[in-house]
Image (cartoon, grey):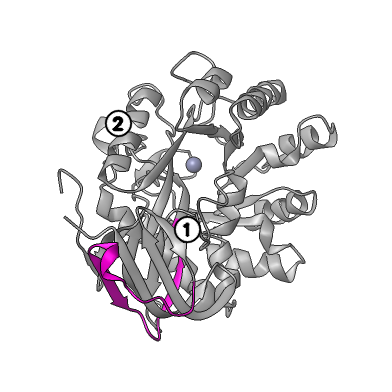
Amino acid sequence: MKPLFTILKGGRRYTPDDAGVGDVVLAAGVITSLADNVLPDPSYGEVEVVDVKDKYVVPGFIDQHVHLLGGGGEGGYATRTPEVMLSHLTRAGITTVVGCLGTDGTTRHVASLLAKARALELEGISTYIYTGAYEVPAPTITESVRDDLIIIDKVIGCGEVAIADHRSAQPSIEDIRKLAAQSRVGGLLSNKAGVLHLHVGNNPQGIGMLLELIAEQEIPVTQFTPTHMNRNQQLLDQGIRFAALGGMIDFTTSVNLSESNVARVKAAKAVSYCLEQGVDLSHITMSSDGNGSLPVFDEQGDTIGFMVGEPMSLYREWRDLVLEEQLELSQSLKVITGNPSRTLKLFPRKGTLKVGADADIVVLNQDLEIEYVFARGYCMVRQGQVVVKGVFE
Ligand code: ZN
């Protein structure tokens, strides 16, 4: 069908650190060489050579928060958002995705999320899921967060569990402590990250509970990956304290521009602000909240409008890090490649260009437009066009 042996020739490689100009060889789904000049040999079988001179060759993007099954429903059944299609992810350069449930853990289930993740994996990208949803106790497949982590290959953490939000189950600190403990032990026994991925809402308490838990020094700070930390300035400042304690903070790139959400800090601006405040870049990630619902509430908490999160926002916000916030390319890439890969314990298979790593690669032109996307060695986007579509696209 397609050659499984590809040479990307003469591009500027970022691992995400700048590795200079040279070739990248993709064979049987992994990177097999980063030599400066690789010549195809007829004995290799069919080899595709792609000229990527003057282009950037970078690791495929990792999106650690996508509502693969859709989400929402805060305005009733008709407002449940649609499922993700393969090309919505690949055209945004996303080659690894972590799926989650959200507000609705009643009509959407972890088992169907697992099935959707498996479907996307069969269609070509790499997928993982969090067990659980907004509510506590967390809905699971085996009736235990810990057992889901240990038994189910794709489960790499628990989330997105809501705190500080009127849509949460109002979990107590004890609830969160227990969930973190289950995630931690499940992660240890399965050699996975076992993160507790927390949706943080608008309540001024923010991540106060996490800061309390960390102070107890029992559960490591790295067990928690709070998201939506750019929801407002106050939460962002709290996140800076959390990062100073060694925590990872995640910024959401899908932005609800409605009036009631004007407090939100644009993700790229939030990254810049954190760096100015002395946060180490290695503590920052971005994710899209793709296909999640972005309901707009009035002052009484009534739903007055809807938007849907877009996976493409991850790419756009990353590009703004370079073009608007003037971050170096290698630094900006870490936020959506190396950092989430380490947090989710997918390194060194994901989030890097390295011999032996999965051949998940994005090729960008000088304007940072996506020209090629390879997922486990297969070309998904070619010259800016989606060439592999999902079964129902
Ligand atoms: Zn959320």
- Which residue is identified by label 2? 76
Query: Would residue 102 be found to the left or right of residue 161 on screen?
Result: left
> Which residue lies at the image location 43% right of the left edge and 18% below the top edge?
141
Spatial separation of the CA atoms under disc 2 and disc 1: 25 Å
Across and down, in percent, residue 122 comes to 28, 40
The disc labelled 1 sits on which kind of residue? Thr
**Residue on which the image places disc 1:** 253
Q: Does 281 appear above or below 140?
A: below
| Residue 333, magenta (yes or no) | no
* Left or right: residue 34 compared with residue 378: right
Label 2 vs label 1, nearer the camera: 1
Nearer-the-camera pick, 365 or 228: 365
Q: Is residue 314 above or below residue 363?
A: above
Residue at position x 40%, y 28% from top?
Answer: 104
Return the x and y of residue 358 as percentages of the image width and height.
Answer: 44, 53
Give me the disc on residue 47: none
Q: Quadrant of residue 276?
A: bottom right
Type of the residue with mark 2: Gly
Residue numbers of the magenta segment: 35-61
How many marks can you see? 2
Residue 159: x %, y % from top left: 53, 33
Residue at x 19%, y 61% (from the top left corner): 387
Tell me where residue 82 sits by quadrant: top left
